[in-house]
Amino acid sequence: MRALLVPLRLVAFSALVVALLAPVAQAEPGTPPPNVAGTTGEPPPAWFTLGSRSGWFAYSSFCWTTTCVTFLSPARRTDLPNLVAKEGQTLRIHLAFAPKSVLVRVLATKRSYPLVATRDPSWRVRGSGVIIVEARGAKGSASYAARIVR
């Protein structure tokens, strides 16, 4: 019996290590993703998690594969998702492609915050207002928008 306990402990420890080191996959929100009417060349949609809440970012301007689209200024748009967040709270961004670069721009302050170029970067909320997530990938550049509210 003792000889069996050592291999079982090793298996349990190995499973724990794999679980801790494996990246945590974030499921997409349960609602349909946004799309851009009149085009089939938009970048993959991006979503966010903020605490226990999740949702889709709105598309903003992009050039992806063979399609370029310029949107109305995000500050004038009424279709942006409202993210209720406190300053310092962590916003997790989920991209469905491998980015070469990612940054968050805060329109009110005109500040940019470069992030680690991963599929799931995170950013600490700094104030309120419209934010733009800009990402560059192998197929082009994409930007996504949301409004931080208190």
Image (tube, rainbow, N blue to C red):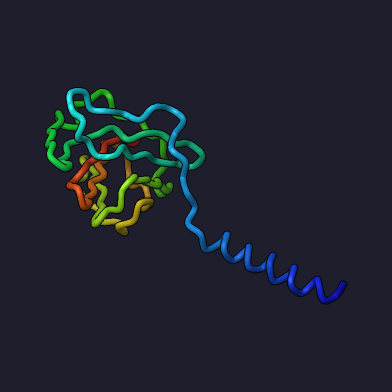
> Can you say which quadrant of the picture contains the C terminus?
top left
Of the pair 38 and 127, the residue shown nearer to us: 38
Q: Residue at x 17, y 47 (%)?
A: 140
| In the depicted structure, whether residue 40 falls above or below residue 12 | above
- In this rendering, the answer to whether 22 lies above or below 55 is below
The image quadrant of residue 33 is top left
Residue 131 location, quadrant: top left
The residue depicted at 57 percent of the width and 59 percent of the height is 19
Left or right of 89, for residue 76: left
Classify the position of the N terminus by image quarter: bottom right
Residue at figure coordinates x 37%, y 39% from the top left: 47
Q: Is residue 24 above or below residue 40?
A: below
Q: Nearer the viewer, residue 143 or 87?
A: 143
The answer to whether 72 appears left or right of 118 in the picture is left
Q: Residue at x 24, y 57 (%)?
A: 100
Residue 136 sits above or below residue 128 on the image: below
- The reply, left or right, for residue 129 in relation to residue 120 is left
Task: Name the one closer to the observer, 146 or 88.
Answer: 146
Is 44 left, or right, of 120 in this rendering? left
Q: Position of residue 145 (x, y in %)?
A: 26, 36
Q: Position of residue 23 (x, y in %)?
A: 47, 57
Question: Seen from this angle, which residue lies furthest right?
Answer: 1
Residue 5 visible at all = yes
Does any portion of residue 150 appear in the rendered image? no
Q: Residue 90: image x %, image y %?
A: 42, 48
Q: Position of residue 137 (x, y in %)?
A: 22, 51
